[in-house]
Image (cartoon, rainbow, N blue to C red):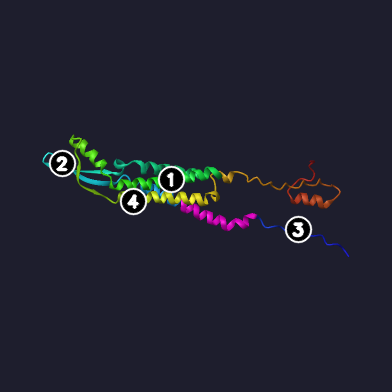
Amino acid sequence: MESVSAVPVPQPRAVAVLAPDSAGSRRSLAVGLLLGAAGATVVLLASGQTWAEGRAAVGGGTLPLNADGQDVTGLPAALAIVGLAALVAVFAVRSGGRIVVAGLLALSGLGAALSAFLGASDSAALDAKAAQTTGDSSATIGALSHTAWPYVTAAGGLLILLAGLLALRYGRRWPTMSGRYERDGTPRPRKAPRKALDPDRPEDLWKALDRGEDPTREA
């Protein structure tokens, strides 16, 4: 009885096993980018709006004054810029460095939210404007009121915080900027060397012609 040679069965690649995980990584990446970019935009826009309004006594009347977020505290806007830089840097670093940058992103959002929330009831900025406008260092603001913009700024900071938490949780699986141009370190299969043409075997000549080679040319 003739022996039957075993035919090697191709093994499934690891990529097929990781497909569902990569899909989840893409979703978390998209959500993280959206939250971070939206949060930073909200903070930068809302911190430029009027946060507090009041009236300063001048002579026998009053002068209306207002203070925007930059007058109250410039910290939320500065931290939003830091958060944007960290959001971009997440894709430029790997492993431990990515965790550090993701932590910076989360802390930037937390700091922006807290500073905006604390500035929601601030009156020092309007008092300083009153003293500067009236020339009286003891001048204060009356009929003080605050707008909702500090809380909008705080909400933007929370969005940045959520982006940082996502980066901390799923950032290890996110791609890097240069990932597509780098090899993964796995050895690539080498091509088997071609056999030398045997001029006494017509089938070799026909195979060479099929490949577009000149069988009469010496190697």
Residue at mark 3? 8
Q: CA distance from mark 1 to mark 2?
A: 41 Å
Residue 34 numbered mark, or none? none
At 50% across and 55% down in the image, what residue appears? 27
Depth check, front residue: 91 or 132: 132
Q: Residue furthest left?
A: 60
Residue at mark 1? 107
Amino acid type at image mark 1? Leu
Amino acid type at image mark 2? Ala
Q: Which residues are magenta?
A: 14-32
The answer to whether 61 appears left or right of 168 in the picture is: left
| Spot occupied by residue 161 in the image (x, y as percentages of width and height) | 43, 49
For label 3, the SS is loop
Amino acid type at image mark 4? Val
Q: Is residue 165 magenta?
A: no
Residue 57 numbered mark, or none? 2
Amino acid type at image mark 3? Pro
| Spot occupied by residue 22 in the image (x, y as percentages of width and height) | 56, 55
Residue at mark 4? 152
Q: Are marks 1 and 4 in contact (CB under 8 Å)?
A: no
Q: Residues within 10 Å of mark 2 (few under 14, many from 20)?
A: some
Of callouts 4 and 2, which one flags the residue occurring earlier in the amino acid sequence?
2
Q: CA distance from mark 1 to mark 3?
A: 54 Å
In this view, the mark in front (1 or 3): 1
